[in-house]
Amino acid sequence: MPRYYFDMRHGDEIATDEEGLELPTIVSVQEEAARSLADMARDAVQSHRDGTRRPMAIEVRDDSGPVLQARFTFEVERQRH
């Protein structure tokens, strides 16, 4: 079974996945990337209340190189305070 690495990008910072996961299909890889990105977005909502734009991504690679990228941007635009 192929091993996939899920690198997390938050703005200009990247956390490289050194362990990876063995997953059977590209659909499984996409679902895992989406779950991981949803967790990142939930954490951003809880920890960033200043309205600053927060681009986030999960960049998935295998031993041959990039496989897919899932992206999300969290942004709050206040109309009044």
Image (cartoon, helix red, strand yellow):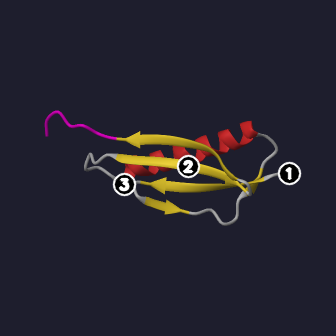
Q: Is residue 75 left or right of residue 23?
A: left
**In this rendering, the label closer to the viewer, 2 or 3:** 2
Disc with the residue nearer the chain's start (2 vs 3): 3
Considering only vertical position in the picture, is 12 above or below 55? below
* Residue 21, image x, y percentages: 74, 55
* Residue 68, image x, y percentages: 62, 43
Q: CA distance from mark 2 to mark 3?
A: 19 Å
Q: Amino acid at mark 1?
A: Met
Disc with the residue nearer the chain's start (1 vs 3): 1
The main secondary structure of the magenta stretch is: loop
SS category of the residue bearing label 1: loop
Magenta-span inclusion, residue 19: no
Tell me what residue is drawn at x 13 percent, y 40 percent: 81
Check the image and name the residue furthest to the top. 79
Q: Residues within 10 Å of mark 1 (few under 14, many from 20)?
A: few
Magenta-tinted stretch: 75-81
Tell me what residue is drawn at x 54 percent, y 45 percent: 37
* Residue 5, image x, y percentages: 67, 56
Q: Observer-nearest residue: 9 or 44?
A: 9
Query: Mark number for residue 47?
Result: 3
Q: Report which residue position mark 1 lands on.
A: 1
Q: Observer-nearest residue: 81 or 52?
A: 52
* Residue 9, image x, y percentages: 49, 55
Q: CA distance from mark 1 to mark 3?
A: 37 Å
Query: Mark number for residue 58?
Result: 2
Name the quadrant containing residue 10. bottom left
SS category of the residue bearing label 2: strand
Q: Amino acid at mark 2?
A: Ile
Q: Amino acid at mark 3?
A: Ser
